[in-house]
Amino acid sequence: MTDSNILKRVWEGKVPACFTLAQEDLAHEDHAPPPIYMFLPRVSYFPLVTEKVIRQFSQFSECALKTASKDMTSETRGKLEHEMQYTQSDQIDTFKQHPLIHEFWLEYAHQPLKWHYPIGLVFDMCADTVDIPWKITVHFSNYPTDLLLSPPVSRLAVEAHFLSMIKEADALKHRSYVINQMQARDHRQLWNGLLHFRYDQFWSINSKLMEPLPQNTKDLPLEEMSAPGIPENKPLSSSLNNMSSSKCRTFRYIPCRLYCVSENSSSTPSGFIQKLIRPLNDDGSLTSLQDAIEILLHTNKNPLVQNTKPKGYLFFIHGITLPHETPMQWISEHLSYPDNFVHVVARPQSHSHRIKIHNPSYM
């Protein structure tokens, strides 16, 4: 399999899901909408792909919407009015009729689902992969502000968070040089590629952000680097074989976050661990996934880590387990989410009966 094929397969990954409306939000208990089944893109975000679900279910939850609308805070209303200035006119009437369309929230097994995380990451953190489709409950009332980012839950909110993550990732990889050289139309094309799920449109811009620097020339001006493009169709074996510490082009740091899931499957994951991960170890060897995990788990009484021993966890990236010797530089270039971060999920070994293990055939 070639490098570009790997990127395409990661992009095309989907999760089967079944959406139902929460019982407490029904306007009439004997008049519930039928479930809605969808394939959700792993690389996308809930507010970008659930508009049809929210629009249809809101018609069966009129009482809940009217009641909650009266209690809408001035802050939330102000945010909505601001967003309406940048919204197409054919959608404004929907906002006025159903102002809480931007205060919906999703739940799985009593766990509120974080709407600002990529869908694939959320699935890896909490879903029971041996019991699919993913059974998600839609709520329009009692928004859990203590567990989720405050509303509005909208495309614009996701876009702002996504671009913030992109900027943070490029600060780690290139000292923000690449993102600062981009123009507004590049940012728009990058976002529209993700929004409309268009691989070529997205990667025509994202490839610039994925261009590593030659070793020992990390301050090299970008114009002296080879011109980036959509990744070539070179064999994976060649890509990995050429990734030796002596001639490897690397980022400054690897944008990476670790999410440790609690032994208690009913508890909501509360955060992530992020540290500076260099692509090369002190001895000049390539930093492996195992090296990165040990760095991330090495912590002093971090409440997010119940077990600091890697053997106590199963580690997932895009729903698969990778060989622990895989270089982090290669992982960052090929298995980052669209926000340019490598999101690693650590689930306790005790969850193994709930997880279907996928080992990549291309490794």
Image: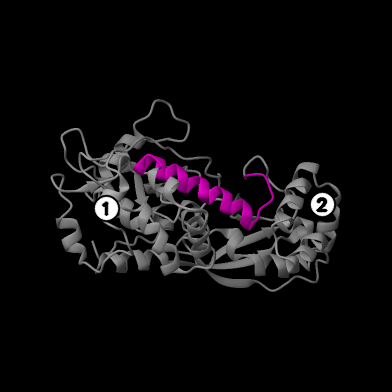
The x, y position of residue 115, in whole percent, is 58, 53
The stretch in magenta equals: 149-176
Quarter of the figure that contains the C terminus: bottom left
Residue with the mark numbered 2: 68
Residue drawn 59% across and 62% down? 48
Which residue is situated farthest in the front direction here? 223
Relative horizontal placement of residue 20, taking residue 128 as reference (left or right)? right
- Dot 1 amino acid type: Trp
Q: Quadrant of residue 276?
A: top left
Sort mark 1 into few (<14), some (14-19) or many (20+) by Cα contacts within 10 Å: some
Q: Residue 210: x, y in percent? A: 34, 53
Looking at the rendered image, the quarter that the N terminus falls into is bottom left
**Residue count near mark 2 (Cα–Cα under 10 Å), binned few <14, some 14–19, many ≥20:** some
Q: Is residue 112 magenta?
A: no
**Rendered position, 345 above or below 302:** below
Q: Position of residue 254 (x, y in %)?
A: 33, 43
Residue 164 magenta: yes
Name the residue beneath numbered marker 1: 330
Q: Is residue 205 above or below residue 344?
A: below
Is 68 situated left or right of 130 in this image? right
Q: Which residue is located at x 82 percent, y 52 percent?
A: 68
